[in-house]
Image (cartoon, rainbow, N blue to C red):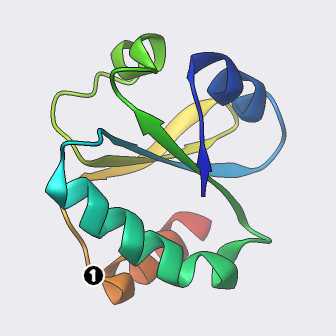
Amino acid sequence: MINANDCEIDNILNSIGKTLILFSTEWCNSGTILTTNIESIENEFVDLYKFIKADVTEANNNTERFNIKNVPTVIIIEDHKEAARFVGIKSSDEIKAFLLETLN
């Protein structure tokens, strides 16, 4: 998972393909758990998704752009638009299911 600021997020979102963005912050324990769960399944989906972690304090523009109100929040971006989102912790299996659903 790539740690990215606003500029890096914008550059990645301008490329083709699906992107998972985890919005969190270093003081968010739930975000730490979710990061671990995402990283545990990342290799299974690396050909299908780009994986980004954005600290809401360092990615203010994208935090506002995607209307992030709670952390952690995960958003799937496809063709420069939000395709799906969830808020809170999910297990590795739940994240896999979420990613597979967004492929259809």
Whether residue 43 is situated above or below residue 34 in the rendered picture: below
Whether residue 52 is situated above or below residue 54 in the rendered picture: below
Looking at this view, is 43 or 25 the one in front? 25
The residue drawn where x is 17% and y is 28% is 69
The residue drawn where x is 64% and y is 29% is 9
Looking at this view, is 1 or 81 the one in front? 1
Quadrant for residue 34, please give it.
bottom left
Quadrant for residue 90, please give it.
bottom left
The residue drawn where x is 19% and y is 42% is 27
Residue 2: % across, % down: 63, 49
Q: From the image, which quarter does the C terminus lie in?
A: bottom right
Residue 55: % across, % down: 40, 33
The 10 Å Cα crowd at callout 1, few under 14, some 14 to 19, many 20 or more, is: few
> Which residue is label 1 attached to?
91
Q: Is residue 104 visible?
A: no
Q: Is residue 64 visible?
A: yes
The amino acid sitting under disc 1 is Ser
Whether residue 102 is situated above or below residue 25 in the rendered picture: below
The residue drawn where x is 34% and y is 27% is 56
Quadrant for residue 42, please give it.
bottom right
Residue 8: % across, % down: 69, 26
Badge 1 marks a residue whose secondary structure is: loop
Q: From the image, which quarter does the N terminus lie in?
A: bottom right
Looking at this view, is 82 or 10 the one in front? 10
> Is 85 left or right of 16, judged from the image as shown?
left
Whether residue 86 is situated above or below residue 8 in the rendered picture: below
> Is 7 left or right of 100, judged from the image as shown?
right
> Is 41 left or right of 37, judged from the image as shown?
right
Residue 40: % across, % down: 49, 82
- Report the label total: 1
